[in-house]
Amino acid sequence: MRRLRRIKILATLGPASSDSAMIRKLFEAGADIFRINMSHTPHDKLRELVATIRSVEASYGRPIGILVDLQGPKLRLGTFADGPVQLNNGQSFVLDADKTPGDATRVHLPHPEILAALQPGHALLLDDGKVRLIAEETSPTRAVTRVVIGGRMSDRKGVSLPDTDLPVSAMTPKDRADLEAALNIGIDWIALSFVQRADDVLEAKKIIRGRAAVMSKIEKPQAIERLNDIIDASDALMVARGDLGVELPLERVPGLQKLMTRLARRAGKPVVVATQMLESMIQSPVPTRAEVSDVATAVYEGADAIMLSAESAAGKYPIEAVSTMNRIGEEVERDVVYRSVIAAQRPEPESTAGDAIAEAARRIAENLDLPTIICWTSSGSTAVRVARERPKPPVVAITPNLATGRRLSVVWGVHCVVAEDARDQDDMVERAGSIAFRDGFVRAGQRVLVVAGVPLGTPGTTNMVRIAYVGPSSEALL
């Protein structure tokens, strides 16, 4: 099943999309990788969903990635004695360590780490930013705040702290249990929520020990300040615009989306743009024009993937949402302006043999108007390096490792095929042409470009480019 677009689609599974028939339809509609949100998924359901995806994968013979999204720390208020209260602009409101139910003047904050880290002048955003407080007096047991933007407040509403660097791990005990459950059943990607620093990523990687790749969700102002270090530590990045738009002014989010997309591409790390991309399709079979433009912008920027959340997990039209994203991706990539935008954003290659080979491969393929670039890759690094160049021809990645194929499902422009490793260079070239012919990327008599690392099977040794002809019997001949 060949996609006619380079950008990938990540679809979240949920109540509207949990059975085999629906997951199959979502894959056929264009989903390349599926997200499982552990905020709403018990372990038995996780195992069921993974087994279903693997069954669909086996029936199509194409690697399908699975991303498990950890919940991360959830900071919430305590309870109110007599139900919801109204907080008025200018009034004083206290958050403290007293477990007694609150009233219109105070409430319990069951997070001593917040009270310990909070400083005068720091903002507190309650209920997804609907209510804004400013800390005026702070101590390890009590914070006196002033209400800047008032509103109705009720039990256990969320608390966000855009100015406060919290000395807490990005993983809670629940996250650790969820992570072990996910690793035990062989998922491909772990999305790490509320990352504040590179150490959060490294902490997760110590537990994962290479069993899955780590995608850092950027949704905190503290992460923006340390973005380069976080990118270096991560395997991929997610622009989590929802929470980012709560803790930062909304007007800053588009610029940060562009910044993160370009920095991740420069580093050769996949980047996913997420949250509210086709939000109206939760209830409507068609999106708004603004949503179409939003999705198109991510495609023009060269993001590796675009994500559906509630649209595919709980909406009324999950198949239509994926199909809409698929059509937008195809149409944008056909636009004559698209290639010039992508080329203008192309970063300079790193000073490594692999990156130099990847740049050369793109130039050769485009100058000779070759129909495809074929990468033999064990770890996936060859395909990722070539995809970083955003070449005009599609990229076919051939790997002997199913886990590699699944992880590449989120990488821009990569059509992955799992096949037995090549015996030698001649076998590699012959089978590269045969597989590309079989999957419709090349016709007999055309030339293809083969990129690989020699000796074969050695990860991270991208050092060879070869032009091959595809013969009339679909075997590649020099």
Image (cartoon, grey):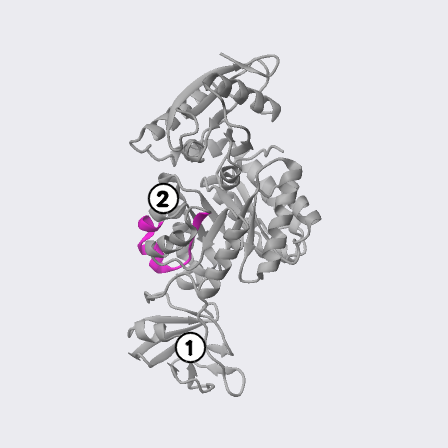
Let me know if residue 51 is in the magenta part: no
Let me know if residue 216 is in the magenta part: yes
Amino acid at pointer 2:
Leu
Q: Position of residue 241 (x, y in %)?
A: 46, 55
Left or right of 437? Residue 75 is: left
In-front residue for pair 17/121: 17
Q: Position of residue 408 (x, y in %)?
A: 49, 38
Mark earlier in primary sequence (1, 2): 1
- For label 1, the residue is 110
Q: Quadrant of residue 32?
A: top right
Which label is found at residue 263? Answer: 2
Secondary structure, mark 2, is helix
Q: Is residue 455 above or below residue 263?
A: above
Which label is found at residue 343? Answer: none
Q: Position of residue 47 (x, y in %)?
A: 60, 54
Q: Is residue 134 above or below residue 455?
A: below
Say if residue 298 shows up in the picture. yes
Q: Quadrant of residue 243?
A: bottom left
User: Residue shown at 52%/52% (left/top)?
Assistant: 184
In-front residue for pair 436/3: 436
Quarter of the figure that contains the N terminus: top right
Amino acid at pointer 1:
Pro
Q: Which residues are magenta?
A: 212-230
